[in-house]
Amino acid sequence: MLRKLLAVVFFTACAALAFSQEKPRLAILPFTGAQGDEGETIAELFSYDEQLNEVFDRIPRTNISQAVSRERRFQMASGMTDPDTVVSISRELGARYVVAGNIASVGKNRLLVISIMDIFNLQQIAGDYLVYTGLEKIPGKLPDMAANIILATQNNTSALPKLAVLPVKLQDGADQRVADTLAQLLAINLIRSGKYAVYPRTGSLEQVTEEHQIQMKGHTGDAYVAGTGHGENPDLVLSVVARKLEKNRFNAEIINLLYGTGEGSGYSVEYQNINDGIKAMEKLSLYLTGTPEQISRLQKQDALSAFFADKARFWTVGISAGSSFAAPWVIGTLHATIAPFRKSFLEIGFDFGMISGVEDVGYYSMYPYAHYALFLPFSKKGGWYAGAGGGYMMSELDYPEGKVSKDTLGADFTTGFNIGNIIDISYTLRTNFKAAENKVSAGYTYRFSQGKN
C-alpha cells in the first residue's frame, strides 16, 4: 500500500513538474486598422521572432485566421481591437497570452500600437508603439518590442492597485479613431509607470461600479465577469473624455470606486492630431502617476511652454538682408523680438550697411535700433505687424580725398509680415527729420512657438 502511495505521489510530482515547464501558449492576432494585408503581414513577422518562440508556444497563423474569421466583432468601426473579442478568440485557441494591436496614420507615416493581454485575469500586462515610414522598416524594430513583451510576462503586478480603463467618451465632434488610439497609448504609458495593473474594459463606468458593489457585498461574480471579458473588479477606474473645441483636448481622471472620489486631480492636455497626441499622452501619464512635486514641476513647464506657444505672442530671433536703394545699397540685419504682452512686441535689432553706389566711394554703417509694434496673428501661423521706434546711425563714407564720418539719431516707422513663422518681409521708413530713406528686407525668422500656432 505504501509503495502504491509513493508511486502515485512520484508520478503526480513528475506530472506537475512537466506541466510547470510547459511553455505558455501565445496567440498573435492580425493587427487591425491597416490597409490590405499589412496588419496580417506585421503579425506574421512578429510571430517569427526567435525570442518569442523560445519563451512561448506560439499558436499557428492558420488556426488564428480561422478563429478570427468566425469572430465578427474582431475589428470595430474605430479599427481598435475589442478586449471582449480578444478573450473570445483566445479561449477558442487555448491561449494564455494574446498580442493584439492596431495601425493608424500619422501624417505620411504609420503608427503601430500593440498590447499583450493575460487571459488568466484579463489584464493588459504590456504595450508598445512605434512610428514607421514603410513596411520594410518593421523587421528591424520588432525584436525590441518582442523583448518588452517577454519581460512584461515575468513581472509580478499582483500587489499593484487595479485600474480599469474605460472607453473614451466623445464630445463636441472629437474624432473617435484618434481618441481611441490615444487612449490606448495612455494605457501603455500607465503600465510602463509601474504604478497600476491595467485592465481594459468595454463597459461603462456604471457597469464597473455595479460589479464593484457586488464584490463589496461578498459576491465576487467572477464567473460572470470573466465570462463577459471584464476581468477582475478593480477599485480604480480611468475615465477619459475627448473634446474638439478650438483645439482638441483629452481629459483624464482616476476615480476611486470605493469612495466615489477622484484620486488626485483630473488633468487635460491639448493635441492637434495623433502625432501630436503621442507626446501628449506621455505627459498625461506623468500627471496621473507623478508625485505632487513632479506634477508641480510639470505644471510650471507647461505654463512656460504655453506662454511661448500663444500665437498672439511674437517671440523670435532672425536674420535678413535688404536694401535702401541708395547708400547703403546692401543691409544685413540681426533682430529679435520680445513679447511679454499679447498682440504686441519689442524688436531689438542691428543693421550693418555697405556699398555707396558711387564709383570709388566706399561706405559702411551701423545702426542699432529698437521698435515697438502691434501684432495681428494670422489664423494659423505668422501675422502682420506695424510699429515705430528709433536708433542711432553711425556711418562713414570713404572718398579718394579722405573719410567722412556721420553720426545721427533716427526715427523708424515699420510694417511687415511674418509668413509661416519662418519668412519675414518688412518695410521701414527711416528719417533724421532732415532727410528720409527706405529699407526693404526679407529673411529667416525662428519663432519660439513650440509648433502650436
Image: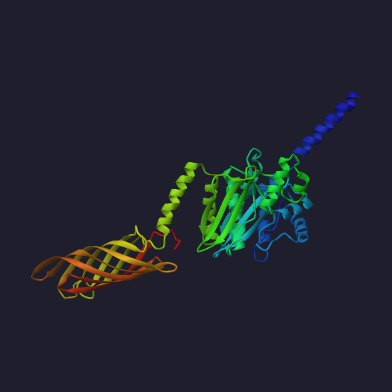
Q: Quadrant of residue 440?
A: bottom left
- In the picture, the quarter occupied by the N terminus is top right
Does residue 12 show up?
A: yes
Does residue 138 show up?
A: no
The x and y percentages for residue 28 are 70, 53
Give 12 or 270, whichever is nearer the viewer. Answer: 270
Q: Up-down: is 173 above or below 2?
A: below
Q: Up-down: is 183 above or below 120?
A: below
Give the number of marks.
0
> In the drawing, does residue 77 fall left or right of residue 342?
right
Q: Name the residue furthest right.
A: 1
Give 132 or 296, whichever is nearer the viewer. Answer: 296
> In the drawing, does residue 450 fall left or right of residue 179?
left
Q: Residue at x 60, y 45 (%)?
A: 261
Q: Residue at x 65, y 63 (%)?
A: 34
Give 239 or 429, whichever is nearer the viewer. Answer: 239
The x and y percentages for residue 92 are 79, 52
Q: Up-down: is 144 above or below 37?
A: above
The x and y percentages for residue 305 are 43, 54
Q: Quadrant of residue 402?
A: bottom left
Q: Residue at x 23, y 73 (%)?
A: 329
Q: Quadrant of residue 340?
A: bottom left
